Image (cartoon, rainbow, N blue to C red):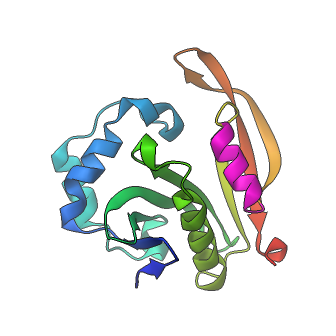
Amino acid sequence: MESLKGGHVILRALEPEDLEFLYQIENDTNIWEIRGTVKPYSRKTLQRYLENAHLDIYEAKQLRLCICDDNGQRIGFIDMFDFDPKNQRAGLGIVIADAEQRGKGYGEESVSLFCDYAFSHLLLNQVYVNVLSHNTASLQLFAKLGFQQIGLKKEWVRTEKGFADEIMLQKLKSDVH
């Protein structure tokens, strides 16, 4: 797959050189609750993951791309998971690693590029996201990009402060203008 290029971001395939960046993000306990992680990952495990990142999405049922700024600096990852070609849908997840990089439009452009790819190249009918109800920045981002709330899972995720609701949002290809 070629890189996907926007005005300020590049979404590219994972490279072996991404190991340390991947290790930092996967082991950042501040984002474990949104990623559903409960334990650290070893470099060896992540190295094996990178070695298999070349697998075709139809085989792996997932795709992770590195988000880079227009200078090529890594700033995060965007993931497609639960890829279901029969029903033409997939889940989407995104993380911008550095809090100082959030709110600068990188996430918006990355999600927009990724959805365009999903609808035009993978011929998906829908993309969905699951967002914790207190993550207002993500909820605003997805609403701005045309995702509609389709469900609420009450007390779905246990956090340090108790249980949090999770909101499911969906974007249909037919809603793309």
Q: What stretch is highlighted in magenta?
A: 136-146
In the image, 28 versus 83, the foreground residue is: 28
Helix, strand or loop for the magenta stretch, by majority? helix
Q: Is residue 151 magenta?
A: no
Q: Which residue is pictured at 39% across the width and 72% down the height? A: 70
Vertically, is 132 above or below 96?
A: above
Q: Where is residue 66 in the image (x, y as percent from the top left)?
A: 38, 64
Can I make out residue 105 in this image? yes
Q: Quadrant of the N terminus?
A: bottom left
Query: Could you tell me if residue 83 is visible in this image?
Result: no
Residue ID at (43%, 71%) = 11
Quarter of image, res 114:
bottom right
96 relative position to 122: left or right: left
Q: Is residue 6 above or below residue 60?
A: below
Residue 71, relative to residue 100: is it above or below? below
Q: In which quarter of the image is the C terminus?
A: bottom right
Q: How many labels does the image show?
A: 0
Q: Which of 31 and 69 is in front in this view?
A: 69
Which residue sits at x=64%, y=84%?
120
Question: Which residue is at the front of the view, 89 or 163?
Answer: 163
